[in-house]
Image (cartoon, grey):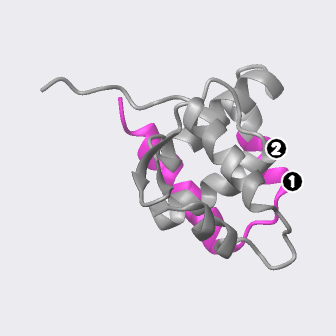
Amino acid sequence: MARHPEPEASRPLTPVELELMHIVWKQGEVSVADVLAALPPERELAYTSVSTVLRILEQKGVLVSRKQGRGHLYSATLPRETYEAQSLRHLMDTVFDGTPSALVARLVEAVPLAPDEVEQIRKLLKSKGSKP
């Protein structure tokens, strides 16, 4: 059986799309009502708005739906890790002129890091440096 490549977000998701995708990634398969229930109480989105955004995400190919009763259940076709990697590549290419070290330097300079996070980054860099 041929393996299909993972879907790709052709461009970064909008903030609302990403907010809903975080819920889908966390819960696995969701209805519109599930998404509404997972939103913080102060986040006032209408049922129709959530439904529309989920359908847009399906049209973009990052979600798939299946009919259940009168509604649909949505699940991600785009894994969170794949989207994170695509987003980082996009950020590196567009903001940091394609230079990974510039992105990492800005991260280290701009974000407060706990000692254990610094050590974890060191380990990641060391293991990356030893791979061909």
Write down the residue under mark 1: 110
* Residue 3 placement, left or right of 127: left
Could you tell me residue 110's position as x and y percent? Answer: 86, 53
Q: Position of residue 20 (x, y in %)?
A: 67, 55
Which residue is at the far bottom?
A: 41
How far apart are the two marked residues, 1 and 2, measured between alpha carbons?
A: 6 Å
Q: Which residues are drawn in magenta?
A: 104-132
What residue sits 61% from the left and 61% below the top?
A: 32
Q: In this rendering, is residue 33 above or below 87?
A: below
Q: 10 Å neighbourhood of mark 2: few (<14), some, or many (≥20)?
A: few
Amino acid marked by disc 2: Arg
Q: Looking at this view, name the residue that lies furthest to the left.
A: 1
Residue 83's place in the image compared with 107, above or below, is above
Q: Which mark is residue 106?
A: 2
Task: Residue 110: say if magenta.
Answer: yes
Residue 13 is a magenta residue: no
Magenta portion: prevailing SS class: helix
Which image quarter holds the C terminus? top left
Instruction: Point out residue 76 in the picture as x, y percentages from the top left corner.
Output: 47, 47
Q: Tag 1's secondary structure?
A: helix
Q: Are marks 1 and 2 in contact (CB under 8 Å)?
A: yes
